[in-house]
Image: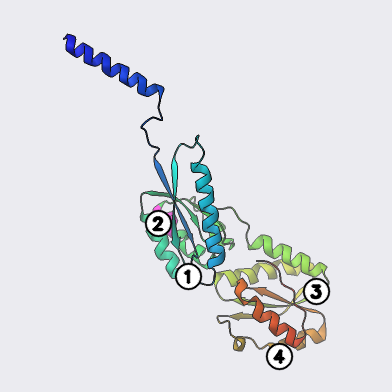
Amino acid sequence: MKLKSGLLLSLSGALALAASFPSAGLAKDTVKLAFIGPLSGGNSAPGLGGRNSAQLAVQLRNADPAAKYTYELVPFDDECKPNVGIQVATKAAADNSIIAGITHYCSAVGIATVDIYSRFGLPVVVWGAILPEITYGNDYREIHRVNGTMINEGRLAADFLTKQGYKKFVVVHDTTDYGKGQNKYFTEYLKPTGGEIFATFPTRGFGSGSYPFSSWVPACWAEAPCCLSRRYHHYFTDFLRGANRVLTATWASQPF
């Protein structure tokens, strides 16, 4: 009986000592966060920049002694392709060790994956994709964003360009959800300013044969100062600028 009492007393003392030093010998739980973006291909520059920014935020949080958990970033490459994005989104959402996601630069991928996150119950924060329907198209509690949308861009672009004196516009956009959305919102906010869409050219390709520049640019320029509005990803900008210089049209381009 005395032996048991002594053991109990020793155990109580040990527990009291451990309670005095809670961090001693007790590792923090690890929380995994998925990062999904284009880490290869034509949009890899912003994708890698986004990943590095997320990794820096994780490192800064882990360096904080007050942090309750240790955070780990798990990167996935969606290649800015909807079919690849669906695959990696499913892989991340099905991993029970991942509790949230930092997702998507490309709108076509972002809109293709929202149903997956909702179905698996994985909360995500969109970090780059600007198609409004990603967050406004459904009543999904799991989908959030930190960046603006095409609504903000379309309104600003229409207001700024018409104030520079441009009234006629030619819109060139790709046929992804991104390009179609940019065309939709720019056109919507151009109408109240008195601007006019002179021509619209949706395209799936990026070669010079995809655009009949020789027919519509001189016609637009002959009537009035004409603004070429590009609603596509940045890697096609140099080609259009070159075509504009050859045809002596005015180049005006807004950020996307």
2 or 4: tag closer to the N-terminus: 2
Measure how far apart labels 2 and 4 are at the Cα level. 48 Å
Q: Which residue is under mark 2?
A: 92
- Tell me the quadrant of the picture where the N terminus can be found: top left
**For residue 85, above or below residue 228:** above
Dot 3 crowding, Cα within 10 Å, few <14, some 14–19, many 20+ = many
Measure how far apart labels 1 and 2 are at the Cα level. 16 Å
Kindly identify the amino acid type of the residue bearing the numbered disc 1: Lys
On the picture, is 67 further left or further right than 168? left
Q: Which residue is under mark 4?
A: 215
Measure how far apart labels 1 and 3 are at the Cα level. 35 Å
Q: Which residue is under mark 3?
A: 166
> What segment is highlighted magenta in the picture?
116-120
On the picture, is 165 further left or further right than 65? right
Kindly identify the amino acid type of the residue bearing the numbered disc 4: Ser
Which numbered dot is residue 81? 1
2 or 3: tag closer to the N-terminus: 2
Q: Secondary structure at mark 2?
A: helix
Residue 99 in view of the camera: yes
Kindly identify the amino acid type of the residue bearing the numbered disc 2: Ala
Overall secondary structure of the magenta section: helix
Q: Residue at x 44, y 42 (%)?
A: 70
Q: Residue at x 77, y 84 (%)?
A: 220
